[in-house]
Amino acid sequence: MSHLKALKFGKAPEVVQVSPEQHRRSRFMAKIDEQLSLAANPKFSVQRLRSRTDSNGVKHREVVDVTPRAWWMGVSDGSYVLVLRYGARKLSLGRGKEAILCSDMAGVVAALEAVRAATEAGELDAMLEEVSKRRG
């Protein structure tokens, strides 16, 4: 008991719950940050946990490096088309507007940074909520 007397005790702080809007924002911004890293370095990879069954039938979890799929595609005229995604679903930026047109890779990076700033300001909350409700 003498060991515990040396410690200082107090009340633990309340755990603050994150709102669903803030949770969606932070997930989307993390994916935008991955895309920005991928634009800067094409060999960028993230680590994911994968399950693997060995020859004895025992499951193991292992860390695997995975290259994220780029949200942009090159067009034949040298420009790029950027399609925003939340999970596997495309974000619709308006009626019939699912893509951002960019003249070059610098434009893709600028568009991603602008979308990140808009997400941080909460301008995309309605779209993210709509896409997350479409799950099923």
Image: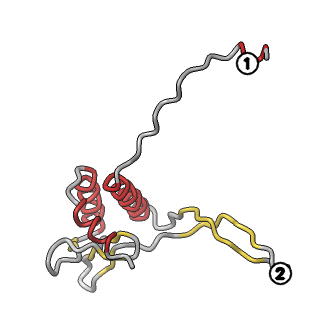
Q: Position of residue 134 (x, y in %)?
A: 32, 76
Name the residue carrying label 1.
4
- Quarter of the image where one finds residue 72: bottom left
Task: State the residue at coordinates (71%, 13%).
Answer: 6
Q: Closer to the camera, 55 or 35?
A: 55
Judge left or right: residue 16 versus residue 125.
right
- Quarter of the image where one finds residue 1: top right
Which amino acid, mark 2?
Ser
Q: Cβ–Cβ below 8 Å for labels 2 and 1? A: no
Name the residue carrying label 2.
55
Task: State the residue at coordinates (17%, 77%).
Answer: 97
Judge left or right: residue 132 versus residue 62.
left
Element type at marker 2?
loop
- Quarter of the image where one finds residue 130: bottom left
Q: Position of residue 50 (x, y in %)?
A: 64, 70
Q: Closer to the camera, 78 or 126?
A: 126
**Quadrant the C terminus occupies:** bottom left
